[in-house]
Amino acid sequence: GLFFLVLVRFHANLQFRFTIGSGNAATCALWEPGAPPPEERISALGFAFEQGYATSVSMEPMLEDNDAMCALAARVDPLVTGTIWLGKMNGGISREIQAKPGVRESLLKIRAGQSDERILRLHDRLQSNPKVRWKDSIKQVLQAHGRLAAPPMAPIQSSIVPANSAHAKRSAAAKKAWVTIHRNRAQRRLESN
């Protein structure tokens, strides 16, 4: 129906990005219950690629060790026209989720595998791939170890607004109204005393 027509009409403007944090079905089932297994995602990635769509993969959060993530990146690379993003597991995991069988053990393994030392080794292995991009969680590690320059500071934007702009006119009118209201209140107080 309509979705198919949109896909056809805007073919050149669409990019499909698939989140694949692991090539291991059991790992994905543990962390993303009910989500399609990695084989299905990779198959969908291949289908989108074969249909001529722009494709990308997000491997965030990385749910496996460096060897597995490098193997996954190599596996999806031929099907990716754009970028392959890698990122660490961020944020806290609730106690409720950690109480599920296997989650706490998996979490500890993932966190150990995402130490600065291991992230630097992952960077060494994948930095020559022009499709690989690093999410902020990895960029912070690279910056801390001098492998990536800190982002330039954004230029300070002037808060001066041209006097003839609509914003300036609204601001002036609001200021005038505020002054008038407060002047009238002060006048009434003086008269009542």
Image: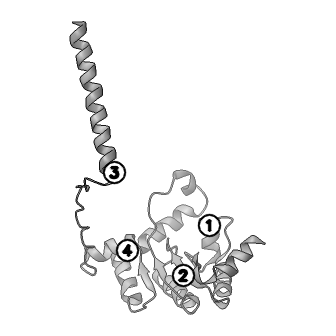
Sequence-wise, the earlier of marks 2 and 3 is: 2
Q: Nearer the viewer, residue 102 or 94?
A: 94
Regarding residue 13, the answer to whether it shows in the image is yes
Q: Which mark is residue 56?
A: 2
Which of discs 1 and 4 lies nearer the camera? The answer is 4
Query: Looking at the image, is 100 positioned above or below residue 142?
Result: above
At a point 38% along the width and 71% down the height, the residue shown is 136
Looking at marks 1 and 2 on the same chain, the residue that comes earlier in the sequence is marked by 1
Residue, x 44% and y 59% (percent of image)? Answer: 91
Q: What secondary structure is found at the residue carrying circle 1?
A: helix
* Classed neighbour count for the residue bearing mark 3: other residues with Cα under 10 Å, few (<14), some (14–19), many (≥20): few
Q: Spatial distance from mark 4 to mark 3, Cα to Cα?
A: 41 Å
Q: Residue furthest right?
A: 1
Q: Residue at x 52, y 61 (%)?
A: 104
Question: What residue would you read off at disc 3?
Answer: 167
**Amino acid type, mark 1:** Leu
Residue type marked 3: His
CB atoms of marks 4 and 3 within 8 Å: no
174 relative to 3, above or below: above
Looking at numbered disc 2 in the image, what kind of residue is underneath it? Answer: Ser
Q: Give SS at disc 2.
A: strand
In this view of the protein, can residue 40 be seen by the observer?
Answer: no
Name the colouring of the figure. Answer: one colour
Direction front: furthest residue: 164
Q: Earlier in the sequence, mark 3 or mark 1?
A: 1
Specify the label residue 138 is tagged with.
Answer: 4
